[in-house]
Amino acid sequence: MSDPIVSEISLLLRHSGRRILLIEDNPLNREVTGLLLSKAGLKVDAAKDGRVALDLAARHAYDLVVTDLAMPGPDGVETAHRIRELPGYEKTPIIALSACVFGEDRDYCLSGGLDDFITKPVTAMRLYDIVLRWLDAAENEPDVLGATA
């Protein structure tokens, strides 16, 4: 892992303006995570649950999705499956957020079609490192980034 300031500056320089869909049912977690992402120059749309997220994803092209796992309605894995079925989202990076830290939870996410996993509480360093890694990787595959390709 790198210094959060280095990762934040890297996000600002290389990915400023990229669109992120943040799905989080807890208002405080949604606000904090959204602020961290916005501070790094990313355009964040926040959804309070999977249903709202699916509506947003159908109307806008996002470069990356960050989703809580445990939500009312469709959970994070189900929401990710449904987003993947939308045109243009087959390869969009989807990152899980979870308070669960067990290996089987991570395995469940990754086998469920999500690309990576961040444990809560979210730290700026971990969030920036993972988002930077996936946006960098997606940039090397032009068909991955929906909003900017």
Image (cartoon, rainbow, N blue to C red):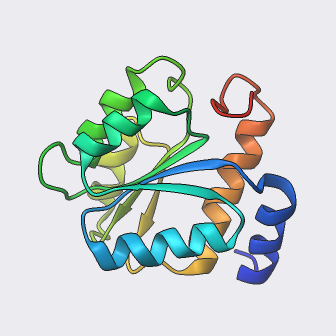
Q: Position of residue 82 (x, y in %)?
A: 31, 28
Residue 112, visible in the rendered structure: no
Q: Is residue 110 left or right of residue 146?
A: left
- Residue at x 12%, y 54% (from the top left corner): 72
Residue at 78% across, 38% down: 139
Where in the figure is residue 128, as x and y percent of width and height? 65, 68
Residue 139 seen by the camera: yes
Residue 54 in percent (x, y) is at 32, 35
| Quarter in which the C terminus is drawn | top right
Task: Give the answer, above or below, for where 94 lies relative to 38.
Answer: above
| Picture residue at 40% right of the left edge, 43% below the top | 110
Residue 86 place in picture, x, y as percent: 41, 21
Residue 55 occupies which quadrant of the picture? top left
Eyeballing the image, is 92 above or below 25? Answer: above
* Residue lying at the far left of the rendered structure: 73
Q: Nearer the viewer, residue 109 or 71?
A: 71
Q: How many marks?
A: 0
Quadrant where the N terminus is found in the figure: bottom right
Residue sitting farthest toward the front? 59
Q: Quadrant of residue 13?
A: bottom right
> Would you say 148 lies left or right of 13 here?
left
Q: Nearer the viewer, residue 33 or 124?
A: 33
